[in-house]
């Protein structure tokens, strides 16, 4: 059962990232083409990535985790939801935002060190930052595996867990009605 939850949780995340990319990449391309924007420097690529991908992805994960279902589209497909650890209630937007910030930290480190700081710091600093993001991602995966898929670093930090979805999530005062 524990490996099953970890596999389903990983599959849900992959589904979410795939869906987000399929929606956001064409939109970013169209907007940049229409506006004549052509990012050339590492910093310009980072700004484009933040506005076209990071901000919408943060909003998606935050609002979905705080929704009545407590689930992104990927988690819904895998019949999972995020709950407060030790409580039946759903997440507040603040808790969901903190969870998202920590969950996406490895991804953002890769963007910052791979693009924003390219040419502004030494190659050693840039590679160290990229390595830190990758090591952190492995720590997150190892932590999730050790908990049987229920909790990763970001879940422990904000007292949440990923569980099999109940047939109807109770409305216990979260901020967002549905995702």
Image (cartoon, rainbow, N blue to C red):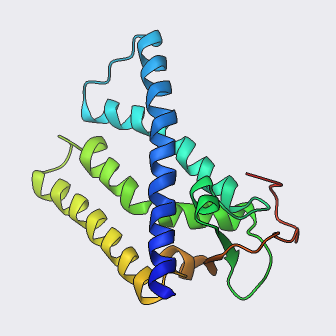
- Horizontal relation, residue 102 to residue 80: left or right: left
Q: Position of residue 165 (x, y in %)?
A: 70, 72
Q: Is residue 39 above or below residue 45?
A: above
Q: Position of residue 145 (x, y in %)?
A: 41, 83
Say if residue 52 shows up in the picture.
no
Q: Quadrant of residue 150?
A: bottom right
Residue at x 63% of width, y 57% of height: 72
Residue at x 47% of width, y 10% of height: 34
Q: Quadrant of residue 89?
A: bottom right
Say if residue 34 shows up in the picture.
yes
- Horizontal relation, residue 144 to residue 123: left or right: right
Residue at x 48% of width, y 79% of height: 4
Q: Position of residue 8 (x, y in %)?
A: 50, 70
Q: Is residue 57 above or below residue 6?
A: above
User: Nearest the camera: 43 or 96?
Assistant: 96
Q: Position of residue 156 (x, y in %)?
A: 55, 82
Q: Is residue 63 above or below residue 33?
A: below
| Residue situated furthest left in the rendering | 123
User: Nearest the camera: 12 or 105?
Assistant: 12
């Amino acid at each position: 059962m524990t490996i099953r939850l970890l596999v389903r949780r990983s599959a849900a995340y992959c589904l979410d990232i795939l869906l987000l990319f399929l929606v956001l990449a064409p939109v970013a391309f169209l907007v940049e083409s229409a506006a004549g924007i052509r990012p050339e420097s590492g910093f310009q690529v980072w700004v484009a990535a933040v506005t076209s991908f990071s901000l919408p992805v943060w909003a998606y994960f935050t609002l979905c985790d705080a929704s009545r279902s407590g689930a992104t589209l990927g988690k819904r497909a895998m019949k999972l939801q995020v709950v407060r650890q030790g409580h039946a209630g759903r997440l507040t937007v603040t808790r969901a935002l903190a969870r998202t910030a920590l969950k996406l930290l490895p991804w953002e480190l890769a963007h910052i060190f791979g693009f924003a700081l390219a040419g502004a710091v030494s190659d050693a600093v840039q590679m160290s930052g990229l390595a830190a993001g990758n090591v952190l991602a492995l720590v997150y995966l190892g932590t999730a595996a050790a908990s049987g898929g229920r909790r990763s670093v970001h879940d422990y930090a904000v007292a949440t867990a990923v569980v099999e979805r109940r047939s109807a999530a109770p409305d216990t005062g979260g901020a967002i009605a549905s995702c």
